[in-house]
Image (cartoon, rainbow, N blue to C red):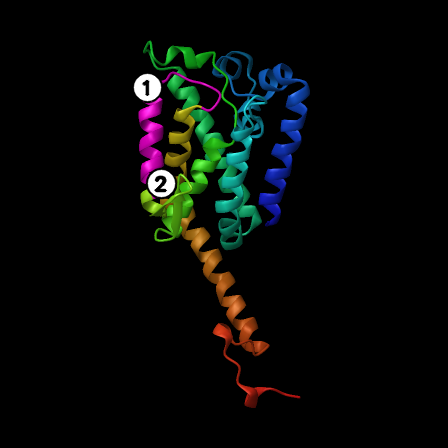
Amino acid sequence: MTPAVRGIVYSNIAVFVVTLFAPDLIVNTFGLQPALVLERAHIWQLATYLFVHSPTHLSHILFNMLAVWMFGVDLERRWGTRAFLKYYFITGVGAGLSMLLVSLLPFDATRPTYYAFTIGASGAVYGLLMAWALLFPHRQILFMLIFPLSARVFVLIMGAIAFVSAVGTSGGPVANVAHLGGLAVGYFYLKGPKNLQLEWRYRLTRWRMERMRRRFNVHKGGRDNWGDRIH
């Protein structure tokens, strides 16, 4: 695992272990509740909810951390640790803000979300999915661990599922509105000026690697010219 991915996974596991012993305290303090953020200024919840997972559903943290590892490693290697962490928290916090906005809508279906707690890294995970689909659109992903799909088709399906679920439910431990928020924030972030900066860093890193390969006479693709070697 790359450094940032390792830190995210280990931090989530540590918080999960603590949550097993004090679930109400951790969820009520660090989970995201729009009422607490807007009325009592618990601003930290917009970031800390990403590290809190349901203590009664092991699959909640298991699949989130599996996704962070699967999609995060390639992105961190491409962008670097600092840029990757920035993107991770921008999409995660953006997903939290989307929950706040939805909770303020004057509809009967959205009012319960004002007092509902949202927990889990799913918002940021969906941001990673969006980045992966934009950068590696033709890579294969096993949908439901069985059906091979291209990354962009996989993200379209996951986005459609999140949309239908968000329309059909008003909230829960894993809020589908946050999933859509992570996708949307990730898309607009990568399609904006920041994408040019990330691509420039990636191309600069590739150029440096190619220069180092030439300097040390490293041949790609397994080629080996014995005549060029010095013994």
Say which residue label 2 marks: 155
The answer to which image quadrant residue 160 occupies is top left
Specify few, some or many for label 2: CA neighbours under 10 Å numbering under 14, 14-19, or 20 or more. many
Q: Give the range drawn in magenta.
A: 154-174
Is residue 144 found left or right of 38 in the rendered image?
Answer: left
Q: Give the percent coordinates (x, y) of residue 1.
A: 59, 49
Q: Looking at the image, can residue 11 be seen?
A: yes
Say which residue label 1 marks: 168
- Frontmost residue, 84 versus 140: 140
Q: Give the percent coordinates (x, y) of residue 176.
A: 40, 25
Q: Looking at the image, can residue 193 be seen?
A: no
Give the amino acid at mark 1.
Gly
Q: Is mark 1 on a helix, strand or loop?
A: helix
Q: What element carries label 2?
A: helix
Which residue is pictured at 57% across the width and 77% down the height?
215
Which residue is pictured at 58% across the width and 18% down the height?
27
The answer to which image quadrant residue 51 occupies is top right
- Frontmost residue, 125 versus 210: 125
- Frontmost residue, 47 versus 61: 61
Label 2 vs 1, first from the N-terminus: 2
Give the amino acid at mark 2.
Val
Is residue 25 found left or right of 77 in the rendered image?
Answer: right
Q: Give the percent coordinates (x, y) of residue 84.
A: 52, 45
Is residue 123 found left or right of 215 in the rendered image?
Answer: left
Q: How many marks?
A: 2
Q: Does the magenta stretch include residue 223?
A: no
Specify few, some or many for label 1: CA neighbours under 10 Å numbering under 14, 14-19, or 20 or more. few
Q: Give the percent coordinates (x, y) of residue 56.
A: 57, 21
Which residue is pictured at 45% across the width and 52% down the height?
197
